[in-house]
Structure formats: structure tokens, C-alpha cells
């Protein structure tokens, strides 16, 4: 990493911290990424193991900001730092290079911000159907669209999986980058031939569990 860029980034970061102290909790973490790696990290109370020079991971807030050059927020995930987090990312520039400023807050902060959804409105062809959350077996992200399922019927919603995760009741568990499942509809869990976990729902649907989310499932179902 360019030492001059790192030093300059550190000076700029301290200025941002002074400004951010007026509106973010004192226990927030702050990270700055330039191009493809992090040049600064100010840890809060979260157990986030982020090091200077670490590469920006695909799907992270920083990666989305660097790719789109737009503000990114309402992200709740635990696949990137092994702990749930809520973050807001801002596009900035350091030495004429595109950069991302990311403020990371504990997940508890997010959950206090909004009440859980009681229903979702899904679209089938040209009809919109309000559906009680408790009746939804699982939610899927497919081809950049979000779908939820009720008795094997498929409904489309404009709300992203990450946005939904902020507002779903606690009995919905993220098990994969592409799936959130209602634990009340889980029939069984087993390993396949490659030792990966597969969830079978009461309607017969089979959903994969990625290694990044297996601890979510173990914690929720205590197995």
C-alpha cells in the first residue's frame, strides 16, 4: 500500500471522526477504503476484525459504495465480519481516488429504528396481494429480484433481502446470501454428500445453508 496515501487517509479520517461525533454513537466503528483496500479503521465496541490493507470484500458496504459511487445504507449482515452490523457508506475522494467512508453501528441500533413487518405485499402478474408475515415460508433473491413464498405460491416484492432482514420478526433467519427462512416451516436439516447443510421445508422445498450463516441457524435452533 502507498504509505503516503495511508498517512493522508489517516489525517482525513481523523477529520471525519470529529464531524461524525456530532451524530453517531460513540461506540461506532469507522472505516475508509480507497480503490480495493482499507486504509483506515477506527474500532468501536463491535468484534470486527478489520485490518489496514485488508481487501474490500464483494457485497460489503464499502464495495457497493466504490462500485456505484452512491450512498449505501440499511445493510444488516454477518457474512462479512462474522458479526451482525448496520452500516452507512458514503462516497468520498482521497487524493483524487474514489473512496468509501463506512460508519458501522451495532445491530441492536438498527432493530430499535423500525418495527417488524406484519405483512408483505407481493405481486403476481398484475395483482398485488397483502400476505401476513407468519404465512411466508421463505424469501429468495433471484436474478436481482426478491420473491417470497406462501404454500408454494411465488410473489414478487420490491424490497431487497438486506432491507427485509432489518424488518422481519426474529423467527426469520438468514441462511444464505440468497435465502431467508421462516424457522416455523423447517421440517428437517441434514448434510448433503459434500457435507453442506440443506434445509427441507414443510412444503418439500430444499434450501442450502452457506458456511457464513451456519452459526445463525445453530444459535436460533440450538443444535
Image (cartoon, rainbow, N blue to C red):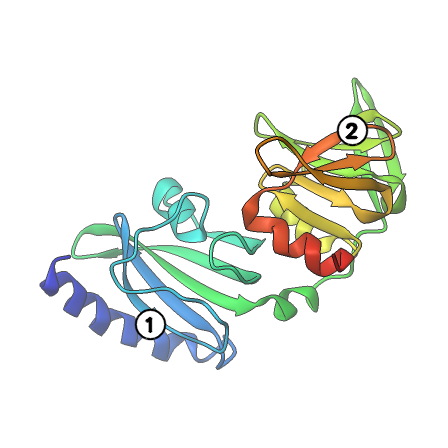
N-terminal of the two: label 2 or label 1?
Answer: 1
Q: Nearer the viewer, residue 62 or 140?
A: 140
The secondary element bearing badge 1 is classed as helix
Residue 70 is left or right of residue 82, and the answer is left
Query: Crowdedness of circle 1 by 10 Å Cα count: few (<14), some, many (20+)?
Result: few
Residue 158 is left or right of residue 67, and the answer is right
Residue 82 is left or right of residue 223, and the answer is left
Residue on which disc 1 sits: 16
Q: Which residue is located at x 89 percent, y 29 percent?
A: 151
Residue on which disc 2 sits: 205
Q: Position of residue 91 (x, y in %)?
A: 36, 53
Query: Crowdedness of circle 2 by 10 Å Cα count: few (<14), some, many (20+)?
Result: few
Q: Where is residue 155 in the image (x, y as percent from the top left)?
A: 78, 28
- Placement of 196 over or under 14, stated as above or below: above
Residue 10 appearing in the image: yes
Q: In which quarter of the image is residue 102?
A: bottom left
- Placement of 135 over or under 9, stated as above or below: above
- Placement of 210 over or under 149, stated as above or below: below
Q: Which residue is located at x 24 percent, y 59 percent?
A: 53
User: Which marked residue is nearer to the observer: mark 2 or mark 1?
Assistant: 2
Residue at the top extreme of this rendering = 125
Q: Do the residues labelled 2 and 1 touch (CB within 8 Å)?
A: no
Amino acid at each position: 500500500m502507498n504509505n503516503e496515501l495511508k498517512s493522508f487517509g489517516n489525517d482525513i479520517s481523523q477529520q471525519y471522526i470529529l464531524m461524525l461525533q456530532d451524530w453517531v454513537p460513540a461506540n461506532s466503528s469507522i472505516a475508509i477504503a480507497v480503490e480495493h483496500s482499507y486504509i483506515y479503521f477506527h474500532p468501536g465496541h463491535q468484534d470486527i476484525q478489520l485490518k489496514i490493507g485488508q481487501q474490500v470484500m464483494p457485497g460489503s458496504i464499502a464495495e457497493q459504495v466504490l462500485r456505484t459511487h452512491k450512498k449505501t445504507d440499511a445493510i444488516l449482515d454477518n457474512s462479512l465480519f462474522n458479526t451482525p452490523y448496520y452500516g452507512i457508506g458514503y462516497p468520498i475522494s482521497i487524493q483524487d481516488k474514489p473512496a468509501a467512508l463506512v460508519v458501522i453501528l451495532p445491530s441492536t441500533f438498527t432493530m430499535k429504528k423500525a418495527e417488524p413487518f406484519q405483512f408483505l405485499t407481493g405481486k403476481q402478474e398484475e395483482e398485488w396481494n397483502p400476505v401476513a408475515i407468519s404465512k411466508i415460508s421463505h424469501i429468495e433473491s433471484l436474478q436481482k429480484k426478491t420473491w417470497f413464498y406462501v404454500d408454494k405460491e411465488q410473489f414478487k416484492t420490491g424490497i431487497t433481502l438486506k432491507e427485509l432482514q432489518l424488518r422481519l420478526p426474529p423467527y426469520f433467519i438468514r441462511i444464505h446470501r440468497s435465502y431467508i427462512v421462516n424457522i416455523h416451516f423447517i421440517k428437517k436439516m441434514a448434510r448433503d454428500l459434500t457435507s453442506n447443510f440443506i434445509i427441507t421445508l414443510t412444503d418439500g422445498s430444499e434450501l442450502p445453508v452457506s458456511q457464513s450463516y451456519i452459526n445463525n441457524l445453530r444459535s436460533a435452533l440450538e443444535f
